[in-house]
Image (tube, rainbow, N blue to C red):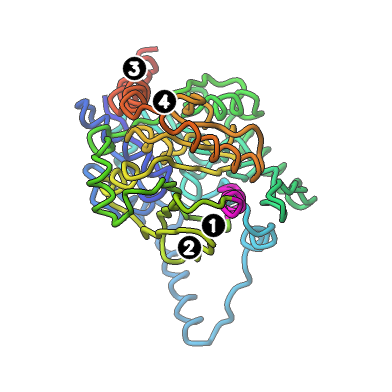
Amino acid sequence: MKVLIVNTYDRGGAANACLRLHEGLLHANVDAKVLLQHKGKKVPQTFQIHNSNTFKNKYQILKQKGFVFLRVMGLLQQPKQSQESQFIKRRAEGLEMFSFPNSNFDITCSPLYQEADIINLHWVANFLDFESFFRKNTKPVVWTLHDMNPFTGGEHYLETFLGADVDGNPVSRDFSEEEMKTSDKILKLKQKALQSAFNLTIVAPSKWLCEAAQKSMLFKNKDIFCIPYGINSEIFQPRDRNFSRDILNIPKDKIVILFVAASLNNHRKGYAYLKKALEMMQRDDVVLCAVGGKESNLDFDANLIELGAIADERLMSIAYSAADVFVIPSLMDNLPNTVLESLMCGTPVIGFPVGGIPDMINHRFNGLMTSDLSSAALFKTIELFFDTISDFDRNEIRNDALNRYDLKIQAINYIQLYQKILNS
């Protein structure tokens, strides 16, 4: 069985989840390869698509290079931005990305596609050309959803909020007429393309995304399975807390709250809610630890330790192990890798009851969920954790994560699904 996994990038949350599955398949002796639009890591059996696998012929490429030369020399004006680019710029700030279903790449021309028995699409925005791929495809396809984009009119998440107000409560989002018209056009294009997709199976990592796909116009008649992400339990494991704090220079006599300070301007990530909740906290025995790049520009009137960007997964497991609790303030999410990683390290998690987070958090066993979406509710839940901190057993949290999210379990579930499809 030859499996081809297709993903746009090899960096980012969806890419990490995709490559972990690839790792699990390789360890299970499956002949798996990954086709990427952009390759930046040296991961075994991952390949960047060749420029020849596009819809442009040699004449068009030479013509384009000629135009570029003339523009550089000042002999030709820069072209106006495409309607797509202009539309994206007009969207409200802080929204999750929006992508169109067209691409210059023809995945079916790749030798990796041609030799594969089954295709596993993952996060393929700006890589998969909807119309041509499903028209030309001759192989069974499994599509692993990492967000809502495959079945929406361009939105990667159908966000209903635009951040928080001054009191830390949600601000409702209104869709513009242009957004609704554009989404309607894209949905119709996707629906027409999928008319020829007879052998398409959908996999969603969370129950929330699974249910959303089942209710969607595009996938409501497709077979949809829920297979959670898998985590390498040898890398993400509990480390000695004192050792971990020594490594990261974190005080041993403090309660440590860990959070990821990335995409601070992205409303969906909920940073504004966390910031407001932490501002309500008046405690000297608490330290906030932030993982994120220098561009985070955190502004807290509290005990704050900025750990900077952490790319090494083993060092990240040390950060989870050093913390008493991990807080994720996302307003909408699939099955966040960070939550799985924290639980695999035995560290409890606090989050809002949204998306796939209720799949992972068993309230008062391996974490806590808020009563509603507000900074006040998040603050109260963090305070509740302080009062019940001794109730959380790291070994039990770790064992529960092993039973549900070990990479071997995910790989087995995918192998069984691939075989079922190929044998049908």
Amino acid type, mark 3: Gln
**Disc 2 to disc 1, C-alpha distance:** 7 Å
Mark 4 — residue?
A: 140
Q: Is residue 217 above or below residue 159?
A: above
Instruction: Find out whether the residues at labels 2 and 1 contact each other: C-beta distance under 8 Å.
Output: yes
Q: Nearer the viewer, residue 350 or 142?
A: 350
Closer mark to the observer between disc 3 and disc 4: 3
Who comes first in sequence, dot 3 or dot 4?
4
Instruction: Provide the secondary structure element on which disc 3 rests.
Output: helix
Amino acid type, mark 4: Pro
Tell me the number on the disc at residue 264.
1
Q: Is residue 42 above or below residue 134?
A: below
Instruction: Provide the secondary structure element on which disc 1 rests.
Output: loop
Instruction: Find out whether the residues at labels 1 and 3 contact each other: C-beta distance under 8 Å.
Output: no
Work out which residue is located at the far right of the displayed protein and give it: 177
Amino acid type, mark 1: Leu
Mark 3 — residue?
A: 416
Mark 2 — residue?
A: 296
Who comes first in sequence, dot 3 or dot 2?
2
Q: Is residue 296 above or below residue 382?
A: below
**How many neighbours does mark 3 have within 10 angstroms: few (below 14), some (14-19), or many (20 or more)?**
few
Who comes first in sequence, dot 2 or dot 1?
1
Closer mark to the observer between disc 1 and disc 4: 1
**How many neighbours does mark 1 have within 10 angstroms: few (below 14), some (14-19), or many (20 or more)?**
some
Instruction: Find out whether the residues at labels 4 and 2 contact each other: C-beta distance under 8 Å.
Output: no
Closer mark to the observer between disc 3 and disc 2: 2
